[in-house]
Image (cartoon, helix red, strand yellow):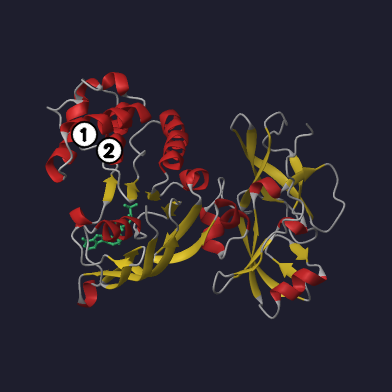
């Protein structure tokens, strides 16, 4: 078991005009037994960070520590780490048992009985106990990935490093394995760093998530902190599906002025905006209500452009109607759309008018220049489920 600390970790590739800073001054403390998900778009530096922790890549600057021990200069095989990749990389001519025991036979002096016990325990944990004498070619993709994970578990490492281990699986199996992996990690209590570009995986699996963009750490927090209290516009747009809607506005006399609408701000929100004169307004699709009548100046007349039913809900793409007296004839092509989610049983048809409400307690505001969050939604109305026993 170990805490894992990254301090000012930096990795540069190439030199001169080819120089790339793949990981840029990343500092992170990962607690003993924690499941930390490193998430971000392709090329943001996730795999490079993981490979530096594993010792497969040197560091340009910064320090990696397990507990108090600096491990930068320790060889990969001496770091007490087990890594699982997207590709299972099983030996095709070996059985499941042989695949799982091979590493232990090669790199430890454990006795045969202990190796057998560990392999059988790990196979049971991974639910592949009855497949132990089969070869990889006789297994499904999901079963092969279980073997790869089992092979990591038998090593009983201080730290697990997982690099997109579920991305070769189909959607249903992936969601099943997500839950299973979480359960297994919790039972084993091994400090784990899990890399993915999939924000759903990050949200559902991590104790905390660390979001990277362009090699730089954008935010570290619990999934719900990152969702409700994003540090900046990048995090707000990356976490959540469908993504948060953004509108460019200028601030005039306590109002946000966009091409399509004006949004008056209350006094506390004005204070949060301060002197910033260009502000991006963000609203999550589930926070936009479609209401029967326009009752406040946070309600806007729109037209339904497209409806995407997803079963439990509908993603409703809406276009603003022109501001009165300014556009005589409404032109859907000219108006930008935004998305609201409504319940699956609500009937909404393309072409119909709708009034969209952006409640002020649910809006996010970002400095349009820096992207930094000026104001996040208020969380007073979050309910706790307390069963009456
Ligand atoms: P993906 O999700 O696509 O795997 P990632 O977030 O894991 O992306 P990295 O693989 O860490 O990203 O790459 C970060 C940046 O470093 C990219 O711009 C990549 O092109 C660059 N890079 C990675 N490895 C090398 C290398 N060996 N030489 C030069 N540049 C590299």
The tag earlier along the polypeptide, 2 or 1, is 1
Q: Quadrant of residue 72?
A: bottom left
Secondary structure of the residue carrying numbered label 1: helix
Residue at image x 37%, y 30%? 125
Is the CB of mark 1 within 8 Å of ligand 1? no
> Considering depth in this image, is 184 or 14 the residue closer to the camera?
184
Residue 350 in the image, given as x and y percentages of width and height: 67, 36
Q: Residues within 10 Å of mark 1 (few under 14, many from 20)?
A: many
The relative height of residue 244 versus residue 263 in the rendered view (above or below) is: above
Can residue 196 be seen?
no
Q: Which residue is mark 1?
A: 115
Residue 321 in the image, given as x and y percentages of width and height: 73, 52
Q: Quadrant of residue 7?
A: bottom left
Image quarter where ligand 1 lies: bottom left
Residue at image x 21%, y 34%? 115
Q: Are marks 2 and 1 in contact (CB under 8 Å)?
A: yes
Residue 328 vs residue 45: left or right?
right
Can residue 281 be seen?
yes
> Considering depth in this image, is 370 or 331 the residue closer to the camera?
370
The relative height of residue 195 versus residue 61 in the rendered view (above or below) is: above
Q: Quadrant of the C terminus?
A: top right
> Considering depth in this image, is 192 or 342 the residue closer to the camera?
192
Q: Which residue is mark 2?
A: 154
Residue 324 in the image, given as x and y percentages of width and height: 80, 58
Residue 134 vs residue 188: left or right?
left
Secondary structure of the residue carrying numbered label 2: loop
Residue 175 in the image, given as x and y percentages of width and height: 46, 33
Tag nearer the camera, 2 or 1: 1
Q: Residues within 10 Å of mark 2 (few under 14, many from 20)?
A: many
For the residues marked 2 and 1, what is the alpha-carbon distance in whole angstroms?
Answer: 8 Å
Is the CB of mark 2 within 8 Å of ligand 1? no
The relative height of residue 120 versus residue 82 in the rendered view (above or below) is: above
């Amino acid at each position: 078991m170990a805490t894992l600390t990254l301090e000012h970790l930096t990795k540069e590739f190439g030199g001169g005009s080819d120089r790339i800073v793949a990981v840029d001054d990343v500092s992170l403390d990962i607690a003993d037994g924690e499941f930390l998900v490193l998430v971000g778009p392709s090329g943001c530096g996730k795999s490079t960070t993981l490979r530096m922790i594993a010792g497969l890549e040197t560091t340009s600057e910064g320090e990696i520590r397990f507990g108090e021990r600096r491990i930068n200069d320790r060889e990969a095989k001496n770091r007490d780490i087990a890594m699982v990749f997207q590709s299972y990389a099983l030996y095709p001519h070996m059985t499941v048992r042989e695949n799982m025991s091979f590493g232990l036979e090669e790199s430890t002096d454990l006795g045969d009985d202990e190796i057998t016990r560990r392999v059988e325990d790990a196979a049971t944990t991974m639910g592949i106990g009855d497949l132990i004498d089969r070869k990889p070619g006789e297994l499904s993709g999901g079963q092969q990935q279980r073997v790869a994970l089992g092979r990591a578990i038998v090593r009983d490492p201080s730290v697990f490093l997982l690099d997109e281990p579920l991305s070769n699986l189909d959607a249903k199996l992936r969601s099943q394995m997500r839950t299973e992996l979480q359960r297994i990690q919790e039972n084993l209590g091994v400090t784990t760093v899990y890399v993915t570009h999939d924000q759903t995986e990050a949200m559902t699996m991590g104790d905390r998530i660390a979001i990277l963009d362009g090699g730089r750490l954008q935010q570290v927090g619990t999934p719900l902190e990152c969702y409700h209290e994003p540090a900046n516009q990048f995090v707000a747009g990356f976490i959540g599906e469908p993504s948060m809607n953004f509108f460019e506005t200028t601030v005039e006399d306590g109002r946000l002025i966009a091409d399509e609408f004006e949004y008056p701000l209350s006094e506390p929100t004005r204070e949060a905006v301060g002197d910033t004169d260009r502000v991006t307004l963000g609203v999550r699709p589930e926070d936009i209500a479609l209401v029967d009548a326009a009752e406040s100046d946070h309600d806007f007349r729109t037209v339904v452009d497209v409806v995407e039913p997803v079963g439990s809900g509908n993603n409703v793409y809406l276009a603003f109607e022109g501001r009165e007296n300014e556009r005589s004839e409404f032109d859907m092509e000219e108006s930008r759309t935004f998305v609201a989610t409504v319940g699956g049983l609500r009937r909404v048809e393309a072409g119909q008018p709708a009034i969209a409400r952006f409640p002020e307690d649910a809006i996010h505001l970002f400095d349009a220049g820096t992207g930094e969050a000026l104001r996040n939604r208020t969380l007073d109305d979050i309910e706790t489920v307390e069963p009456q026993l």
